[in-house]
Image (tube, rainbow, N blue to C red):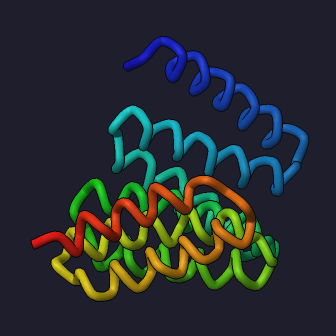
């Protein structure tokens, strides 16, 4: 594991312990998602799912829709890398709905890009293209240059 990831995980574990001691459930849930994302970054997708699932349970109980969206995106990423594509698609689609509801257009577009990657992995090129077009429209509206890389993905998929 990269030394920076190991350090970040240690800090995450420290923060989680302190949030639990103080009874700060929101901080605990957000930290569980961050720890899960770090596990995913190091390739430990099962641990990522375990941590993010705990976070999601707490966020749903608290009604934290933004936290849920971020955690569902993390879960989708982990499921995708474990080739559990149905679970990844479901997680990403739920995240997109929640990001849209909170008007978080940037993260909605980022999640659409990852959803497209998962759909492409399942062979559903048509749906992948559709979600990538939606992502490009959002990035364009935000003036974000990421729209160009999304259009590049679309061009690659369309090539014979």
**Quadrant of residue 102 in the image?**
bottom right
Residue 31 placement, left or right of 81: right
Residue 59 placement, left or right of 4: right
Q: Work out whether residue 125 or residue 98 is closer to the camera in this orientation and state it.
A: 125
Residue 14 placement, left or right of 150: right
| Image location (x, y in percent) of residue 109 | 59, 69
Number of numbered markers: 0
- The residue at the point 50 percent across, 72 percent down is 112
Q: Work out whether residue 35 or residue 124 is closer to the camera in this orientation and state it.
A: 124
| Image location (x, y in percent) of residue 144 | 67, 57
**Residue at the limit of the structure toward the left, as seen here:** 160
Q: Quadrant of the C terminus?
A: bottom left
| Image location (x, y in percent) of residue 153 | 34, 62
Residue 20 placement, left or right of 150: right
- The residue at the point 44 percent across, 74 percent down is 132
- The residue at the point 27 percent across, 72 percent down is 85
Q: Quadrant of the N terminus?
A: top left
**Residue at the limit of the structure toward the top, as seen here:** 3
Residue 13 vertical placement versus 130 (above, below): above
**Quadrant of residue 68 in the image?**
bottom right
Residue 49 vertical placement versus 40 (above, below): below
**Quadrant of residue 127 in the image?**
bottom left
| Image location (x, y in percent) of residue 98 | 68, 80
């Amino acid at each position: 594991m990269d030394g920076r990831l190991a350090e970040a995980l240690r800090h995450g574990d420290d923060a989680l312990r302190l949030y639990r001691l103080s009874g700060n459930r929101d901080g605990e849930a957000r930290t569980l998602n961050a720890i899960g994302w770090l596990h995913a970054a190091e390739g430990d997708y099962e641990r990522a799912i375990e941590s993010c699932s705990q976070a999601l349970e707490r966020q749903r109980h608290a009604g934290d829709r933004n936290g849920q969206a971020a955690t569902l995106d993390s879960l989708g990423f982990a499921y995708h890398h474990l080739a559990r594509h149905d679970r990844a698609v479901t997680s990403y689609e739920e995240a997109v709905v929640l990001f849209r509801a909170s008007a978080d257009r940037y993260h909605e577009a980022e999640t659409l890009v990852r959803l497209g990657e998962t759909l492409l992995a399942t062979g559903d090129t048509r749906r992948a293209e559709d979600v990538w077009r939606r992502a490009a429209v959002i990035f364009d509206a935000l003036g974000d240059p990421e729209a160009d890389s999304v259009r590049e993905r679309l061009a690659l998929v369309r090539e014979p």
